[in-house]
Amino acid sequence: MTLSVTAPLAERIAAYATEVVRPLAPAMARGGEPRARELIAEAGRRGLAGLLTPAALGGQEAGHVAFAGAVEAVARECASSAVIYDVHVSVASEPFALLGDEDQKRRYLPRLAAGEWLGAFALSEPGSGSDAASLTTRAVRDGDDYVLDGTKMWITNGGEADLYLVMARTGGPGARGISAFLVEAAWPGVRASRPLRKLGLRGSSTAELVLESQESLPLGDGFIANVGHWKQSFTTPGGTRQSVEVRTSEVLQKTDGKWLYLVDHASVGAPPPRAPARRGGRRAPKH
């Protein structure tokens, strides 16, 4: 495990943030034309799109300290760009770098690490966000292949990605009945909606992903793991939580620590958290 960042890599990260991300930041804030492909393609050219991918498969194998540093540098210039970059490098690539078979790794990871393909992670659904283990998207076996049926929601890079890492139910209820699949955007029955309108992070495409294959998809080759390995398959969200903390830190520094409040959000059946006291002793209004 790499616990430090080399000087040349730190310089490449800083240059990418200032030379590529910073000029795009105003347009990203306005939410104009999506620029995810441009961002990731340039990251690939600079050797930054595969920081968590093995070197033998075209990545840098730089480790999570370098990854966190890269996310921090990008977030300092543009929060939308940081979300795009974070998802591509971590949850869209690392799970099958750790758990996929050799054919899957050789087929997809070099393209993702080079920035030729854009990746996305499809877990959340309209009825299961924080309580991800209650997802209902199904993958039904059909010979060596599968038929996918379900809807994913709030998918970062949705509609732009070339490859989705999709969680679908292959067994009974709960986490043990869930499996992970690699799904190409070009396959029949894979359809993303127009990007959702958001209050912030407008430069990052967030979309609904509809999976309604009328025929079997070649998911036999795309099957990664039964997520009865739930904890194992989700080794990467630990890294994702790390990057979310880094992104949030940068955003709060830019907003002078002003609080944003979540309203009407329930996490796995729990009530929404109480808003912390604001400066001057005032609290956010109740809703």
Image (cartoon, helix red, strand yellow):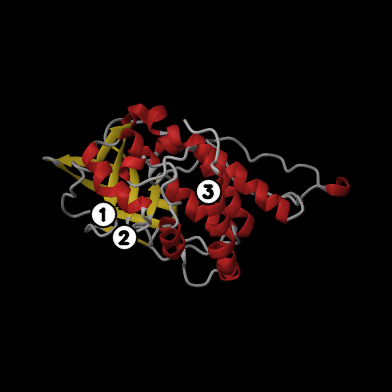
Q: Which residue is mark 2?
A: 191
Q: Which residue is mark 3?
A: 8
Q: Amino acid at mark 3?
A: Pro
Question: Judging from the image, what secondary structure is the residue with disc 3 in?
Answer: helix
Indicate which disc, 2 or 1, sits on the residue closer to the N terminus: 2
Question: Judging from the image, what secondary structure is the residue with disc 1 in?
Answer: strand
Q: Amino acid at mark 2?
A: Arg
User: Does 86 sit above or below residue 201?
Assistant: above
Residue in front for this viewpoint, 73 or 241? 73
Q: Give me the disc on residue 122.
A: none
Q: Position of residue 212 (x, y in %)?
A: 26, 54
Q: How many marks?
A: 3
Q: Residues within 10 Å of mark 3 (few under 14, many from 20)?
A: few
Instruction: Say whether residue 258 is left or right of residue 30.
Output: right
Residue in front for this viewpoint, 237 or 97? 97
Q: CA distance from mark 2 to mark 1?
A: 8 Å
Q: CA distance from mark 3 to mark 1?
A: 46 Å
User: Does 138 sit above or below residue 227?
Assistant: below
Q: Residues within 10 Å of mark 1 (few under 14, many from 20)?
A: some
Point out the frontmost of discs 3 and 1.
3
Instruction: Say whether residue 250 is left or right of residue 114.
Output: right
Q: Give me the disc on residue 212.
A: 1
Q: CA distance from mark 3 to mark 2?
A: 40 Å
Q: Position of residue 139 (x, y in %)?
A: 25, 42
Badges 2 and 1: C-beta atoms under 8 Å apart?
A: yes
In this view of the protein, can residue 33 be seen by the observer?
yes
Place residue 53 in its image quadrant.
top left
Identity of the residue drawn at 27% across and 32% down: 171
